[in-house]
Image (cartoon, grey):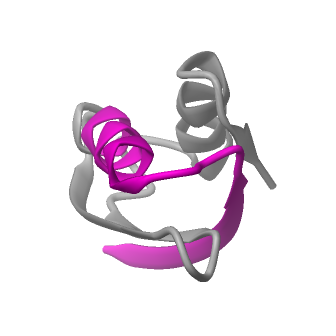
Amino acid sequence: MDTAKFSVGGMSCQGCVRSVERVLLAQQGVAEAQVSLELKEACVRFDPQSVALDTLKAAIRDAGFDAD
């Protein structure tokens, strides 16, 4: 398992945080996702053999948020 942290923009409430976490956890290979509204970041533990970091960021963007 790898762990990655990246910025997430466009969140304004805890509902947004839950939405981003839900989108990340729905991706195959993601074991854990923690999103912080205050830090505007996501910390994701994932299997790089199952899912690429770019795929995770694209899923967040598809949900209407920014991911860098």
Task: Pinpoint residue 29: horizontal percent, then vertical percent.
Answer: 26, 46
Taking 42 as reference, is 53 left or right?
Answer: right
Image quarter in which the C terminus is found: bottom right
- Residue beneath the point at 59% across and 76% down: 5
Image quarter in which the N terminus is found: bottom left
Task: Pinpoint residue 21: horizontal percent, then vertical percent.
Answer: 32, 49
Of residues 62 and 15, which is closer to you in this image? 15
Q: State the residue lying farthest toward the right.
A: 68
Task: Please tell me in which quadrant of the rendered image residue 7 appears.
Answer: bottom right
Where does the magenta region start and end? 1-24
Asked if the stretch drawn in magenta spans residue 53, the answer is no
**How many numbered markers are drawn?**
0
- Residue beneath the point at 35% across and 55% down: 14
Taking 62 as reference, is 9 left or right?
Answer: right
Above-or-below relation of 4 to 28 = below
Q: State the residue lying farthest toward the left.
A: 31
- Residue beneath the point at 61% across and 17% down: 62
- Residue beneath the point at 66% across and 35% down: 65
Task: Pinpoint residue 49: horizontal percent, then vertical percent.
Answer: 40, 50
Of residues 12 and 57, which is closer to you in this image? 12
Asked if the stretch drawn in magenta spans residue 22, the answer is yes
Of residues 64 and 50, which is closer to you in this image? 64
Q: State the residue lying farthest toward the front.
A: 13
Above-or-below relation of 34 to 11 = below
Of residues 2 and 33, which is closer to you in this image? 33
